[in-house]
Structures are given as structure tokens and as C-alpha cells.
Amino acid sequence: MSVAKRVSEEMECKLGGLVGYAIRFEDCTSAETKIKYMTDGVLLRESLNEGDLDRYSVIILDEAHERSLSTDVLMGLLRKVLSRRRDLKLIVTSATMNAEKFSKFYGSAPCFTIPGRTFPVETFHSKSPCEDYVDGAVKQVLQIHLSLPPGDILVFMTGQEDIEITCQVVQERLSQLDDPPSLAVLPIYSQMPADLQAKIFEPTADGRRKVIVATNIAETSLTVDGILYVVDSGYSKLKVYNPKVGMDALQITPISQANANQRTGRAGRTGNGFCYRLYTEMAYRNELFENTIPEIQRTNLANTVLLLKSLGVKNLLEFDFMDPPPQANILNSMYQLWVLGALDNVGDLTPAGRKMSEFPMEPSMAKMLITSVDYKCSSEMLTIVSMLSVPSVFYRPKERMEEADAARDKFNVPESDHLSLLNVFNQWKGHGYRDDWAMRHFLHPKLLRKAREVRVQLEDIMKFQKMDIISAGTDFDIIRKAICAGYFHQAARVKGIGEFVNIRSGLPTHLHPTSALSGLGYTPSYVIYHELILTSKEYMTQVTAVDPYWLAELGSVFYSVREKNFDDRGVRRQADREFSKRAELETEMAKQREATARKAEEDAVAVKVGASAARILIPGTPRHVGVGAGLRAMATPRKKPGI
């Protein structure tokens, strides 16, 4: 958005006219748009309806080194599109990527180096390993502030908690000194209100030095003028998926060398800079990966598999991944989609799966939305899904945490975080969607407005799919059952106060302290959850209490109700069914592996034969043009995948 706005200003045209942008749930373009900025995910969604992306003549993939899930899939799709469209130009750009690897992936495409207008940056490493990176960062900030020339400081931390602690400790230690120079300490993270985030870009009124404490978003997405000093903790938070337990673990992990170089470069934008790394040079050279592990190799692939199936990709092992994901992740994702009814027994897309793929969200949420039509509560589910599609709307400033918690408690609906989100939106709607009301109740107005926009977009998709929008009124039980229809595979049973056990894996898990269920005074016997996050403990987020009979009805492949005098045979039958289905999918994957291997052998033989034949030339006969080189495009019309 900000780049599109800047370019439209420089071209002196209205945003949405000649220059526009498209992000999830928001399209600011028109028929006259010639330059369109968009996320990789939006371009992926467009490929569903237009396989060859014919409306574009040039596509630029920026920040390719970040290797997001959508970017990796998009690169594979564009490789196919380029083989069909000789007129399409693709430019892949990044400041730190492995250019040779990308060039090889696209058939030895030419590489160009464009020198940047950056200033030299002097890098300093710790002489010994830093045991506490927060304490180390605080000491380094104070040393810079008290002894080095003017210039703002940028500190890289892992997340909101570390950022707030760092800011607090810097201020505390400054207050203990006798008449220290004034310092503006400014945090920035995604949950902050936009007006507070904007402060990092504003010059201080009295010209005092700023220290900005940020996450890795400041590596590329933010550029703040005046930064001369960078303090690099050497860590970031990554979401890592474990297919064996079906859990997303938000882990603090060492950054890569590419990340470190990006952070260093932040100090050389406006003058000669300095970067202080809180790790040794030996650790940088020998312990850090050259590049971050691509997201496609460490996250849940259910949404990606559904998208590829929608594009007509039968054999996922033959898809052109730059770095193929683990086969266990693919199998687990296919199994999850089968459980939700999106894939049939041989891994092909079902009508329900086709409908789910139309919604730009994770499959479980799409299933929840589709099922709500049958349960006649689609109006409420639209709101719940929209609220889940934006970051948390609750704002908890450090200096007013108790007030914020009390305000949040007033919105809680017993036994359901999902219904609590519905309550927040409905109350905001009842007060005329007013920003001042939201601020008084410690809610983010901007995120609430975004949720409202998302709801409008999803409602349009539902109407296009001829899905009825029906309200259940105050029948919360039917809404909870519809929620269960999308998340029955993520269920837990009570073990103690606030403690649960995942029904399928047997692993212990806990209610998140912010959950509406935490203050009930009792613990429901069975719950479903939106996501599992591993921080200090395994926490369930967005939890709703459910009836065990709903689990048995909606998730019969996993669960059965054990009645009186019921023996273990029923439980074993459920386990056998689950094992049988996984075995069936594994067999299908094995067939695909064999087919892929055979095709590779045939291609190798064909190449060998072709190489031999290429040496024999009949005098006076020109050498034939290779497959796909110019003439084929005129003789053979392009076919769109999946048609």
C-alpha cells in the first residue's frame, strides 16, 4: 500500500488509477491501472481464475530471499507459465538472495547487479557469546548513547514481550544515572495502534536521539531515516509446524547470515553506520545458516495443497518447487484435507474442496463457513471468520494493563473465545462503528475496520457461490457446533484446572491466559481450538467448549462416544480407521513417487538420445528448433491448467 501510494504521488496520479494495489480482502485498482502492487498471496489467488496470468506483461517478484510460502509456490507456477508464454517477462529481485540458485531454477536466466546508494557500515561482533540478549542489547544501547556521536539506534528483538522488556530496562537504567542525555525509547510491533507506530518516523521535537526497538519487520519493510547504529540480538521468532503432533510452534531461533546482512544494511542508509552484533564472528561464520529455511519446509501446507489441487496439479511430487517440502508435511496436509472433506480417497478435489478453495483463508475456517449455511448461522460465522482473519483487536498498553484486561473481560462470552469475538464486533456495530468507542474499550479501531471490510468481501464471495446468509440470533449452541465442524480434528479433553490433553496426540496443552474460558470458575470437559502455539508452554488459542457428541458426529474418523460397559474395541476401530486412511494416502504418494522417478529416467534417456541425434546433421538442412522455442507457441495454443 505505502509503495503504491508513493509511486502514485511521484507520477502525480490518483491512487487506484494508473497505479494501484491489491492485498487480501482489498483491491484498489481500476480498468486504467497499469502498475499494480500486490502480495504474493493475491497473485496466487488470481492464478486460480487465470492460469496464464494473461493480463500481465511483466511480473516483478521482490524480496525473493525471504522465501515465503506463497512466493515459493508462485515461483513454481511462474516457471510453468513462462514455458507457455514467451511474451511474459519475469524479474526476481532481492538485496541478499543467492542469485545463482534462482538463475538455475529459471533455466540459467541472466543475473544483473545494481549498485545501491548505501554508505559503508562497520560491523562489530561480541568477543564472547552473549548469555542474555536482552541485557546485552540494553548495555550496548546505553554505551552508544553515552559515548558515541549523534545518530538514532535500531535494535532487533524477537517479539512484543522482548521489545517491551528492552524498552523498560533502558528507561530504568537511564533514570539511575546522573543527568544523562535525553533519549526517546520507541517500540514497534504489529499489535501497536497505527498512531503509535507512526512515531518512529517522526523527528523528535527537541532533536534528541531515538532508539527504536523492533522485530525483523524492520529488516526490509520499514526504512527509518537517521539510523546510524544497529544492535542485532541475532534471534527472531519463526513459526515451525510439527506434522506428528499437528502443532505450530512459535520458536525463538538464530537468524541466518542473510538476515544478519539485511540488519547490518539498515545502518548505512543515510551515512556511515555501525552494527553491533551480540554474537561472535565465529558463530556468524560457522553456526548461522547461509539463508533462512524456506517457509515451505517448516509450515503447515494444507492451504498450499488445496490451492495446487485447485490448479489441477495431480501429482504434488512433480510440482516445480525450488526446495521441495518434506513428504511427511505433504502427506499430513492431504490427510487433513481429506478429514475436512476437501479431498476424496485418491487425493482428488471434491466439490466441497472446490468451494473451500474459493475463500482466501485456511481450509478449516473455510469449512466452518461453508457448514454454517447448513446450520443456518452463516451471518454470525461471517463475523467470527472476519475477526479471526485480522490480528488481535485487543490492545493492552503496558501502563494500563489492568484496565485493558477488565475491559476485555466485559466482552467475554462463557465457553467460547469465538463467540467473544462475535460479541466485540456486534457491540462495536451497535455503537455505530465509532473509533472513540473502540479506543475507550481498548480495541484497535483500524483492525475492527479491517474486519468489517473482510466481512463484506467474504459475504460477496458467499453470494457469488449462491450461499445463503442466515442469522441464528442468540442460538449460541448451533454456532458452537458449526465452529466444531471446522475444528473437530483439533480437540482436547480436560485434565485439570486450565489443563487439557490433546485427544489425538495425548500431548498436554493449556488454555491461554487471555482465553474467555480461563475465568469461568470451572473447566469444560471438551474444547476445540484454532491454533496451538508453543512458547513457554503449549497453549491453545481461540478456544470453544463443545459437546463430545458433536465430536463423535462430525469427526467420526477420530472419535466415538464410550458408553457404560463399553470396551476398548470401539476405540481400536477408530484408531484402525485413521491408520487405514493414512496408509491409503501413503500408498497413493508412493505411486506418485514411482511415477515421478520413471518420468525422470525417461527424460534422462530422452536427453541422452537427443544429445546423440544432435551430432548428425544432413547437409543443407537447418538444425531443428528445440521444443518450446518460438514456433511451438504459434502452432500449439496454450492450455490453462485444470481446464
Image (cartoon, grey):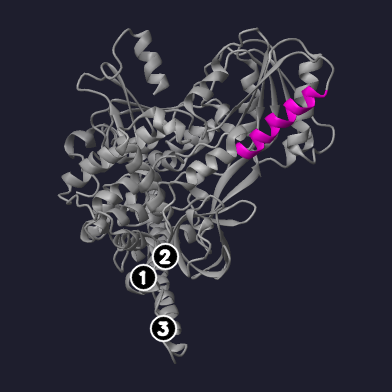
Q: Can you say whether 532 is above or below 571 in the image?
A: above
Could you say which quadrant of the image residue 132 lies in? top right
- Helix, strand or loop: magenta stretch: helix
Q: Position of residue 193 (x, y in %)?
A: 49, 29
Q: Amino acid at mark 1?
A: Gly
Q: Quadrant of the N terminus?
A: top left
The span from disc 3 to disc 2 (Cα, nearest Å) is 17 Å
For the residues labelled 2 and 1, say whether their Cβ atoms are less than 8 Å apart.
yes
> Mark 2 and mark 1: span between their CA atoms?
7 Å
Q: Which residue is mark 1?
A: 555
- Amino acid type, label 3: Arg
Give me the disc on residue 489: 2
Front position among marks 1 and 3: 1
Q: Quadrant of residue 201?
A: top right
What residue is shown with label 3? 573
Residue in the image at 18% along x and 51% along y: 467
Residue at (61% x, 8% y) in the render: 205
Q: Secondary structure at mark 3?
A: helix
x then y, percent, for residue 612: 40, 46
Query: Residue 341 in the image: x percent, y percent?
Result: 30, 63
Which image quadrant is residue 219 in? top right
The answer to which of marks 2 and 1 sits earlier in the sequence is: 2
* Residue 291 visible to the viewer: no
- Say which element carries label 2: loop
Identify the element where label 1 is drawn.
loop
Estimate the spatial distance between the alpha carbons at disc 1 and disc 3, rounded to whole Å.
14 Å
In the current view of this chain or complex, which residue is farthest to the left? Answer: 466
Which region shows up in magenta? 160-176
Instruction: Compare residues 495 and 585 and report the one nearer the observer.
Output: 495
Crowd band around label 3 with a 10 angstrom C-alpha radius: few (<14), some (14–19), many (20+) = some
Q: In the shown orientation, is residue 231 left or right of residue 75?
A: right
| Disc on the earlier residue, 1 or 3 | 1
